[in-house]
Image (cartoon, rainbow, N blue to C red):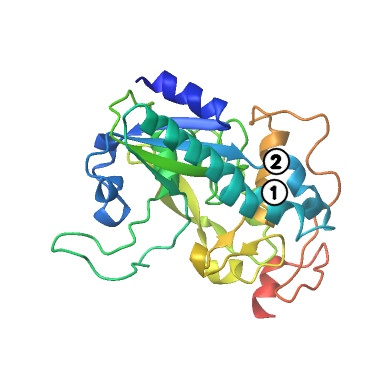
Amino acid sequence: MTSREIKKAARELGADLVGIASTESLRYLPAEENPLSIFPQAKAVIVVGRKVLRGTLRGIEQGTDLDNSFPTFGFYELEDNFLAKTTYDITIWMEAHGFEAVPLFAYDSPSGQAIGVPVAPGKPAPNVILKYRTLAQAAGLGETGMNGLFLTPEFGPRQRFAMLLTDADVEADAPFEPRICDDCGECAIQCPLGALDADKTKPAGFAGFERSVAERDNKLCLRCKNGAIQTNEGRFRTVERVGAACGRACICALENRGATEEKFSNPFRQSEPWARDFFGNKISKNQPAVETRHV
């Protein structure tokens, strides 16, 4: 089996993105984030993605549909059904060729959420949660932007990922050299709650290929009424931000710069962006976002 055969099969089974990282390059990761903790015999990590349809964000961008199209077809159904089906089918294909593959969702789990205790000395406590952004960059698919969202050359922040750990010893892709985000800061500027601080950054990404990511106040994100989705316990009560003000500002900035490969007849932003405070009240155009911190 070759990496080309895997990628061809993955695309035929519905993947819009597919890249391969070597587990050898990931040995530096701590045990609680390392794919080898789950599958010690794994030789490669196959990262597959399906795009978030631009049209699912139209209602959020216009401020007229926050609870139908995007949450369904851009998030929950996309991950739990469409992407899951593609990942399952690739796993079946791998096993039919005599290779084991461990399918995993790309959950966005905060650090320090071990569930249970180690089953033996030297083992990490369950659950081991892989940092999918790191693995996707190692697999050559993209980078983490200033806003903390993963960006690809094809779709910007518009995709969902899953991963397969496999014992197939296949050629890996080169890690992605950051080049998509240009630190324009529109994500921070357009956050009505001031949750992103572009003046305070830290490196993030695959070792040796990191780029700066803005400091983010997750407590503010959890109160966002601007297109963010607060997830349930099954998704670790994190915040989905592709449809939020910061994610949509990023889509607009990248498309205006011609930085994404997928092109459209009309611009993403077709009217002035809207904004709400913690309680869902409209924020006037000239009102400083920082004032909402004290609402």
Rendered residue at 63%/35% (across/down)? 155
Q: Residue at the spot x=27%, y=38% of the render?
A: 42
Specify whether 234 is left or right of 134.
right
> What percent of the width, then of the height, locates residue 260?
64, 31
Residue 169: image quadrant is top left
Disc 2 marks a residue whose amino acid type is Leu
Quarter of the image with the C terminus in it: bottom right
Which labelled disc corresponds to residue 73? 1
Q: Mark 1 and 2 residues: CB-CB less than 8 Å, in contact?
A: yes
Is 255 or 80 nearer to us in this picture? 80
* Residue 176 visible in the snapshot: no
Tell me if residue 16 comes above or below residue 35 in the rendering. above
Q: Secondary structure at mark 1?
A: helix
Q: Disc 2 on helix, strand or loop?
A: loop
Task: Tell me the amino acid under the disc marked 1.
Answer: Phe
Q: Residue drawn at (69%, 56%), measured in percent from left and top?
A: 71
80 lies left or right of 258 = left
* Residue 288 screen position, x and y as percent: 73, 67
Left or right of 73 in this view: 182? left
Could you tell which of marks 1 and 2 lies nearer the N-terminus? 2
At x 54%, y 27%, the residue is: 11
Whether residue 127 is visible: yes
Can you name the residue that lies furthest to the front here? 96
Q: Which residue is mark 2?
A: 53
What label does residue 35 carry, if any? Answer: none
